[in-house]
Amino acid sequence: MDDNRSIKKILELIEKYSEVKNINENTEIITSNIIDSFAIIQLIFDLENIFQIKIEAQELNIENFKNARTIYEFIKKFPKYD
């Protein structure tokens, strides 16, 4: 999956778990309360399935999940990232 498609997919997932629509790749999703803690867990499961990665508990920090761009940059670090 190329960069743009990956970011678009991440944005779709964020919007799936949020009542806020039309967010962009730089919209802060946690500090802006766009998604709640339960939605973050659902988002992580979806990311693992779609991108075929395994996210460890110690990797769950706000820096990796600030917005769609940081999520994408985080995912790109995984060896199984496609």
Image (cartoon, rainbow, N blue to C red):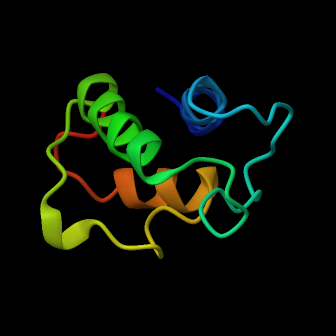
Q: Above or below — where is 31 with respect to 21?
A: below
Q: How many marks?
A: 0
Question: Residue at horizontal 28%, vertical 40%?
Answer: 81
Question: Residue at horizontal 46%, vertical 73%?
Answer: 62
- Quadrant location of the C terminus? top left
**Place of residue 51 in the rendered image (x, y in percent of width and height, measured from the top left):** 31, 31
**Place of residue 78 in the rendered image (x, y in percent of width and height, measured from the top left):** 23, 53
Nearest the viewer among 7 and 66 is 66
Within the image, what quadrant is residue 41 found in? Answer: top left
Nearest the viewer among 8 and 62 is 62
Within the image, what quadrant is residue 32 found in? Answer: bottom right
Q: Is residue 70 left or right of residue 23?
A: left
Question: Residue at horizontal 53%, vertical 50%?
Answer: 36
Q: Above or below — where is 45 with respect to 30?
A: above
**Place of residue 65 in the rendered image (x, y in percent of width and height, measured from the top left):** 48, 61
Question: Residue at horizontal 54%, vertical 33%?
Answer: 6
Within the image, what quadrant is residue 64 found in? Answer: bottom left
Q: Above or below — where is 19 with respect to 62?
A: above
